[in-house]
Amino acid sequence: MTFEEIGKFLEEHDCFTILTHRSPDGDTLGAGFALWNYLRDMGKKAVVKNSDGFPDRYGFMYEGYEPEEFAEQCVVAVDTADPKLFGEGLAEYQQEGRVDLCIDHHVSNKLYARQSYVDGAASAASLILYQLFKALGRPISKQIAVCLYTGIATDTGCFKYENTTPEAHIAAAELIQYGFGYAIINRMMFDIKSKGRMAAEHFVQANMEFYCHDRCALIALTTEIMEKCGVESAEFEGIASIPLSVEGVDIGITIKQRSEDVFKLSVRTTEKADAAAFCKRFGGGGHIRAAGCEIKGTLEEVRAKVLKAAEELGL
Amino acid sequence: MTFEEIGKFLEEHDCFTILTHRSPDGDTLGAGFALWNYLRDMGKKAVVKNSDGFPDRYGFMYEGYEPEEFAEQCVVAVDTADPKLFGEGLAEYQQEGRVDLCIDHHVSNKLYARQSYVDGAASAASLILYQLFKALGRPISKQIAVCLYTGIATDTGCFKYENTTPEAHIAAAELIQYGFGYAIINRMMFDIKSKGRMAAEHFVQANMEFYCHDRCALIALTTEIMEKCGVESAEFEGIASIPLSVEGVDIGITIKQRSEDVFKLSVRTTEKADAAAFCKRFGGGGHIRAAGCEIKGTLEEVRAKVLKAAEELGL
């Protein structure tokens, strides 16, 4: 699909359901609400859906957002590589053919939508939308700039990671000229920690396990552990980057309990290992430096499986 | 001074001493070694000087650097607002008229050099050099791109802070196309922590003091405290950003003992306070969100003075 064809698709419909992935991050919400604002500016009706709701910390992106009631006419998914990732609350959209258009930047995209625009080289889904809006020519509002900037910034670790392309910087250069408080946004997204969060990080750092000659750092969080340490489980969101922050570590693995016998793995790697390939072994996927998967079993079983795979990396 | 005039100045001389500020950071060294490489590519002789030496963590910037012996012909200072900041080891350059050219981005620059190029709106001294080199037209090497990128990235907190201009993003977009490992550099500059560093951060977080209805967070580090906690004092470098990372804090103050009765203050602020104005009260200066000064007295006296000033901010 070309940008022109997407533009035509948006023109030709009136009522849009925009789907974002569960455990929403800055990019899926940035892309979702940028598109919502854009469609509204076109005079269309639209709603953004997320299986887990919209976290407060992203409130500045959905300021002024009001879901409207309307008969669903078409469905657009953003930043979602696999219909499973819509989550349980949006299970109805997991059926084949339910999504009309998917705009995504994951190379692992399953091409489940009727039509897809997937650019695996794009730093963020929000960057694709930036390029789309630019190609279509309609001016964007400051609020759209806020959403696009936040999506790009959060998915690149504030322009820090390998996936930061020249295009991401050029988009940022243009977007920050809309005159919003990008430094305040970055502070909220990357720097500010509640005292509970600090406690969670302390806990995680103090309980990190090291394997493979200290090249592999692992955090294992069961529901029980999280409860015991007296910190709300929400404070443990996004800690997956911590293991990789230890000097000399090339693969950081965070194992978090989802339910009785299901564990969610978040894998982060340096240039020495491929996180997406690692997670693919367990039926997951993602990016080369950041990927995820789910593994069933007891914590001991999951840890053993994961460490076997880590050892095979030969770090 | 215009870029053209600087270009002429560089053309007309053969042997350059490049001065960088004490407690060197990524920007002063980035600008210094970018200029060193540039002059060498022009066929000139040059040396980079720092009162405190060049820290290992910036080793990738001075790879291949060898100081040459020559009769000093002219002196260029980069990223140094005040000749005092050359430090004790370079005290000889603190005399009036010793510096021929100063290239800097601190609005507080004392204009101590015979000629100065000061752009207070530039995100980094390295960004000014990028613009200078671009204006002069001579192609730059990959190593120069590494130095300039690192200077811009470190001074903007990886494009996170308010001082990140569209120009900084545009420079980054161009520089990363030179094909060096910017993600590895960013990981080294911003993410990786030794286990000692983690211990230092734990110590600092656990001993933070809160004032002004929790709007002011303060860290006080005496030589004795640093020795007692069993972490090397070098691990406490750059912890000044930690107090501001606590939710709700608008001014973060780090007081670090320099000698018996001299304490160095590092002040970081949100948009609610002016760090440069705060430090100016004590004879220091810097940027609106990050500034510093020195105060004489016992720790108790210094803390009392600082808290009085903090209270007067009315946060």
Image (cartoon, coloured by chain):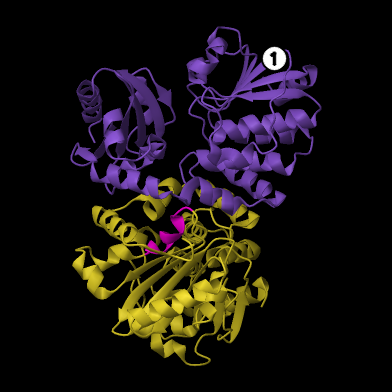
Chain colours: A purple, B yellow
Q: Return the x and y of residue B229 as percentages of the image width and height.
A: 21, 64
Q: Give the class, few, some or many, for how many residues have Cα within 10 Å of label 1's Cα (few <14, many ≥20).
A: some
Q: Circle 1 is placed at which residue position?
A: A74
Label 1 sits on what residue type? Cys
**Whole-percent x, y for residue A146 in the image:** 65, 43
Say whether residue A60 is left or right of residue A260: right
Q: Residue at x 48, y 62 (%)?
A: B213
Up/down of A203 relative to A112, above or below: below
Residue B125: x and y, percent?
A: 54, 67
Q: Secondary structure at mark 1?
A: strand
Evaluate whether residue A124 shows in this view: no
Q: Residue at x 41, y 23 (%)?
A: A285
Q: Is residue B240 left or right of residue A307?
A: right
Q: Tell me the chief SS of the magenta region.
A: helix
Residue found at x 56% / y 52%:
B172
Q: Nearer the viewer, residue B225 or A272?
A: B225
User: In the image, which residues are magenta?
Assistant: B238-247
A158 over B239 or under it: above or below = above
x, y percent for residue A266 = 36, 31
Q: How many tags in the picture?
A: 1
Is A31 magenta? The answer is: no
